[in-house]
């Protein structure tokens, strides 16, 4: 197997930091971390940037990650993966396997994928043939191994949180002058620029895990090389600087953003290089390193989890005849013919199709004022900012790609503008686009979560 060496960053700092004044150390929790390699076999189909061939080399390893947390207030498991996203059925399968072995409910298990575009095919997105069965078995076995190891590695930790900003994401929705948008860099467009992070340190001040999030597509590298993309580069940098193997990237609200390094002005995007991928990782590590020196605050552990299914209204579903025209048009591309045939079959079998799309909202509080708020979709930056506005106390991780990805989740403003984030609904096997009620759905769900759930907007 041909393997291209990744760059090895040099360690820079020791993150031991004394508590200011007479503040007592926060109550401790138990935490354990582990990761397991999930490289696919060479030749396996790629997914993410339309590569027609199978992968040819492993540039750097893909992993699944497990962070096990337990405290008198509860138990939770955070799973990460250097992969694109999973279908809901796959997430149910993984959580079921974990639950049978360790008696954890789905609500206690939050799974986030980095949305890596330089990895293997995982789903039936865009009417592909789906993931190889044996690879799905490999992922399940690796997740179970990582969970087992994380539980075996449990030790007492203190929780520290911080946040900073990043200029890596650039909006990819450029106004075209007609009220619509085109696929191009828009440096003045809305992005979610927050960079939250969390350090878990044991009694010897060693970092057990470093949890962090950037809201930006990992879609720099186009080719047939397997790579964890810029999140993998950031993990390597952070592991070296913080003397740990526990760095864990969570994908934020990056559905409509790409890295600044691959923007050609405001004209177009280009493929990135391996050096540029490493530069993005270094920029993330630099920002966290600098913030960790001055912005860290002690967090009192208080584990809480919540889950609810939100309902996103769709626009009117076209009649059967509209899908028949698509199916019978010889100029229709193959994938859209498969979509039209799929919708016709469902209409014939069910009579009517649902008018709302179910999307999960998963919230996990690590400590007072430190929480993850994740949606089961490709969440755009504007909705990530809406989460931050709603949970504006303490440190909030606004996340997409959590427990799967049902569809792109655009803001209400974007529906009339159209663009890929709106018009790609069919690639996710849905019969119609979302209606312009997206912001209201998110606001209502977050208000319900704060008023009726355990994840409050407070840092106390």
Image (cartoon, helix red, strand yellow):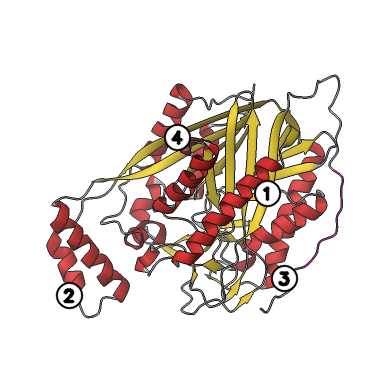
Q: Quadrant of the N terminus?
A: bottom right
Asked if labels 2 and 4 touch by Cβ distance under 8 angstroms, the answer is: no
Q: Find numbered disc 2 in the image and state the secondary structure of the residue it sits on.
A: helix
> Dot 4 corresponds to which residue?
307
In percent of the image, x 87 and y 52: which residue is there?
12
In three-dimensional space, the C-alpha distance between marks 3 and 1, rounded to whole angstroms, equals 28 Å
Disc nearest the viewer among 3 and 1: 1
Q: Quadrant of residue 131?
A: bottom left
**CA neighbours of label 4 inside 10 A, class few (<14), some (14 to 19), many (20+):** some
Residue 222's place in the image compared with 289, above or below, is below
In three-dimensional space, the C-alpha distance between marks 4 and 3, rounded to whole angstroms, equals 40 Å
Disc nearest the viewer among 4 and 1: 1
In percent of the image, x 53 and y 46: which residue is there?
111
Residue 389 at x, y percent in the picture: 53, 34
Disc nearest the viewer among 4 and 2: 4
Mark 3 or mark 2: whose residue is earlier in sequence: 3
Q: Find numbered disc 3 in the image and state the secondary structure of the residue it sits on.
A: helix
Foreground of the two, 161 or 392: 161
Whether the magenta-drawn stretch holds residue 307 is answered as no
Mark 4 or mark 1: whose residue is earlier in sequence: 1
> Dot 1 corresponds to which residue?
34
Residue 119 at x, y percent in the picture: 55, 67
Foreground of the two, 94 or 295: 94
Foreground of the two, 81 or 241: 81
> Dot 3 corresponds to which residue?
275
Q: Quadrant of the C terminus?
A: top right
**Magenta-highlighted residues:** 7-14
Q: Find numbered disc 1 in the image and state the secondary structure of the residue it sits on.
A: strand
């Amino acid at each position: 197997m041909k393997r291209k060496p990744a760059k090895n960053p040099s360690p820079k700092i020791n993150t031991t930091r004394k508590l200011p004044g007479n503040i007592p150390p926060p109550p401790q929790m138990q935490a354990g971390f582990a990761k397991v390699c999930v490289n696919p076999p060479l030749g396996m189909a790629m997914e993410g940037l339309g590569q027609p061939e199978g992968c040819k080399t492993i540039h750097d390893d893909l992993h699944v990650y497990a962070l096990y947390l337990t405290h008198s207030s509860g138990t939770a498991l955070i799973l990460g993966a250097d992969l694109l996203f999973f279908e809901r059925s796959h997430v149910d399968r993984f959580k079921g396997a974990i639950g049978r072995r360790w008696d954890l409910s789905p609500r206690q298990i939050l799974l986030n994928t980095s949305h890596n575009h330089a990895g293997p095919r995982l789903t039936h997105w865009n009417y592909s043939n789906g993931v190889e069965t044996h690879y799905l078995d490999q992922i399940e076995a690796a997740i179970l191994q990582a969970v087992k190891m994380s539980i075996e590695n449990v030790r007492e930790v203190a929780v520290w949180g911080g946040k900073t900003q990043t200029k890596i994401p650039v909006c990819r929705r450029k106004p075209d002058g007609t009220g619509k948008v085109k696929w191009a860099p828009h440096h003045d467009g809305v992005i979610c620029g927050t960079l939250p992070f969390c350090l878990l340190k044991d009694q010897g001040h060693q970092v057990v895990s470093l949890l962090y999030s950037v809201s930006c597509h990992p879609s720099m590298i186009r080719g047939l090389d397997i790579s964890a993309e810029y999140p993998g580069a950031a993990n390597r940098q952070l592991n070296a600087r913080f003397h740990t193997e526990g760095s864990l990237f969570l994908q934020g609200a990056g559905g409509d953003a790409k890295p600044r390094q691959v923007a050609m002005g405001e004209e177009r995007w280009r493929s990135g290089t391996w050096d540029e991928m490493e530069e993005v990782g270094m920029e993330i590590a630099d920002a966290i390193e600098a913030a960790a020196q001055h912005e860290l605050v002690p967090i009192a552990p208080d584990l809480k989890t919540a889950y609810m299914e939100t309902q996103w209204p769709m626009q009117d579903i076209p009649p059967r005849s509209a899908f028949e025209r698509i199916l019978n048009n010889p100029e229709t591309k193959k994938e859209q013919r498969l979509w039209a045939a799929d919708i016709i079959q469902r209409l014939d079998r069910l009579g009517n199709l649902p008018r709302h799309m179910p999307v999960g909202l998963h919230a996990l509080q690590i400590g007072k004022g430190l929480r993850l708020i994740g949606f089961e979709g490709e969440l755009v930056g504007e909705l990530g900012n809406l989460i931050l506005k709603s949970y504006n106390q303490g440190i909030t991780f606004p996340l997409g790609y959590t427990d799967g990805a049902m569809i792109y989740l655009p803001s209400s403003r974007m529906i009339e503008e159209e663009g890929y984030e709106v018009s790609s609904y069919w690639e996710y096997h849905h019969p119609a686009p979302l209606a312009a009620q997206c912001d209201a759905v998110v606001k209502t769900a977050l208000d319900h979560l704060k008023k009726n759930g355990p994840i409050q907007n407070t840092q106390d």
